[in-house]
Image (spheres, rainbow, N blue to C red):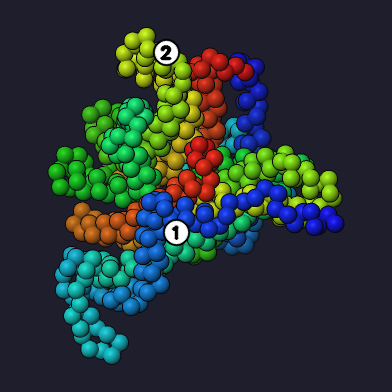
Amino acid sequence: MADVILDIPIAAPAKPAATFRNLVHNPGVVFGATVILIVLLMALLAPWLGTIDPTAINPIARNKVPGAEFSLRTDTGERIKMIALFGTDGLGRDVYSRVVYGARISLLVGVSVALISVACGLFIGLLAGFFRILDAIIMRIMDGLMAIPAILLAIAMVSLFRSSVLTVIIAITVPQIPGVVRLVRSIVLSVREEPYVEAAVTLGTSTPKLLWRHVFPNTIAPMIVQGTFICAAAILVEAILSFLGIGVPPEVPTWGNIMAEGRQVFSLFPHNIIYPGVFLAMTILAVNVLGDGMRDTLDPKMAKRV
Amino acid sequence: MYGYLFRRLLGTIPVMLVVAIFIFLMLRLTPSDPAAIIAGDNATTEQVAKIRGQLGLDRPMVEQFFIWSGKVLSGDFGESFFFKKTVASLIGERIEPTLSLALITMLLAVLVAVPLGVLAAHRHGSWIDRIVMGFSVLGFSMPSFVIGYLLIYLFAVWLGWLPVQGYQRISEGLGGWLRGLVLPSLTLSIIFVALIARMTRTSMLEVLSEDYIRTARAKGQSERKVLFRHALRNAAVPIVTVIGLGVALLIGGVVVTESVFTIPGLGRLTVDAVLARDYPTIQAVILLFSFVYVMINLAVDMIYTLLDPRIRY
């Protein structure tokens, strides 16, 4: 009997089709999604975009300026002429190929960090918002974590393990979790007072089911928005860590690593910094603009929070 | 007010305690053994064991934590593995450049961002507003090291107006000190300007629709006075809040900017310490930065009462 009543959606959510239409009509969402799609395609199709092996060292073609011609020895041993569209770096590696392949790491790190930190933050936040005893402990720990500036915490975490993509993902994820926890907790605390939650409690709904069916759906829209902003931040922090030489191992082509490579010769050959920098900035801009657009359409209340 | 200040100071103790426990555990649970690092590659097992005893690493974890925090409270952060000096003296040497960079950046950012935000709100919907908002999104997305290198290329390499990199101490002359800091603080202030301008605009827009603003205009008050005396004062609390929270960004930015401009400050020290796996230094720097961040935000809460007499504690 109780189940029958609870199956009726009490707070009718916005129809998915209408939400989708609103999203498509938001210029920020369209711009952001388009640029991200292009970068995604670039990452997936990297081997077919006229690139060569991004890690291939070519000593006779070091520090070529963009547009210069250089010769390359193929696997079969014959020499072919190539145009270095974005120039080559200090080891003769093709910057264009490295930039195209670099999109893979940036997107991988951005998306992984967003998914993991939202999942962890959601779980911890739901617990903190619903169980008074846990709340005090969890929030003290989160306050402590938030007192450490995010990049510093990531830098400290990186120093603990051997450098790898996984290390970087973990190091960037941990500082992002407290923010998600706080947001989820505040949503839970306000949803708890809603009549439909009280009704469900009165009807004897079990706590896991209550959290899953009645509280969790309220967090979906804010989490999508928050996750998008975290993705942008993660791409930026990954680039910063790699740039500082403490991120992804230097042989892996990432935008941050290409720039780190170009630091010494920057005043003579700025292309090592400029091309990956433009791609990096455009990608982060697109993700941020997408986030802004989604916030305005999905979660108008949140637009006022920051 | 003083009662509140006291209570808030007490409130920072658990926060800093969590930070301290976290940093302590994080760096003690690493696979690398500090005693082995200090002893060097050729040390015998006995030598390593002796150093362990000296450092107290053979005692129980809880005891180690209390010994460590007792030392930290008295300003003793131990000795750097890498630089072979006490961490406290290292920090003492490196603090001037970082402090100079941070203060100039802050000043520059507030002086630029607040008027921009006010203007954008005043001309809501106009092209000025659009430019400010566009710049704000762009500022958030431009990595500071990319901005830094672009500025170096433009002003130092191409135009040759300013030094490319490096830092000159205040004691060696005010002019050189300031010249060296122009590009770094410009670089670092971009994200700050974006953050503060956006918040100023939002907060001003809310206040400008209030009745007392209409009253002020109706009685013939000049627009400048309406904006800066009536509106900005009432819009100030969220702006000051975001400046306080932005200190976290500033600290992160200092690390990057000092690396770009090779400024021998605390940020550079952090990166060098991580590269050398110099754990005592890493611990000290993070603890110090977190403490400063917490204290600044405490100070921000105190400033509220000055800005808005309605807020009482």
Q: Nearer the viewer, residue B163 or B46?
A: B163
In the rendered view, tell whether residue B292 sits above or below residue A70.
above
Query: Which amino acid lies under the numbered mark 2 shown in the image of this protein?
Result: Thr
Q: Report the residue at 27% width, 85% height from top.
A: A74
A70 horizontally vs B255: left or right: left
Residue A5 position within the rendered picture, expressed as x and y whole percent measured from the top left: 79, 54
Q: What residue is pinned by disc 2?
A: B215
Q: CA distance from mark 2 to mark 1?
A: 57 Å
Q: Name the residue furthest left.
A: B159
Q: Quadrant of residue A275?
A: bottom left
A292 horizontally vs A92: left or right: right
Residue B282 position within the rendered picture, expressed as x and y whole percent measured from the top left: 51, 47
Between marks 2 and 1 in the image, the one whose residue lies nearer the viewer? 2
* Res. A164 visible in picture: yes
Q: What residue is pinned by disc 1?
A: A247
The tag on residue B53 is none
Q: Report the residue at 34% width, 35% height from top.
A: B125
Residue A49 position within the rendered picture, expressed as x and y whole percent measured from the top left: 31, 75
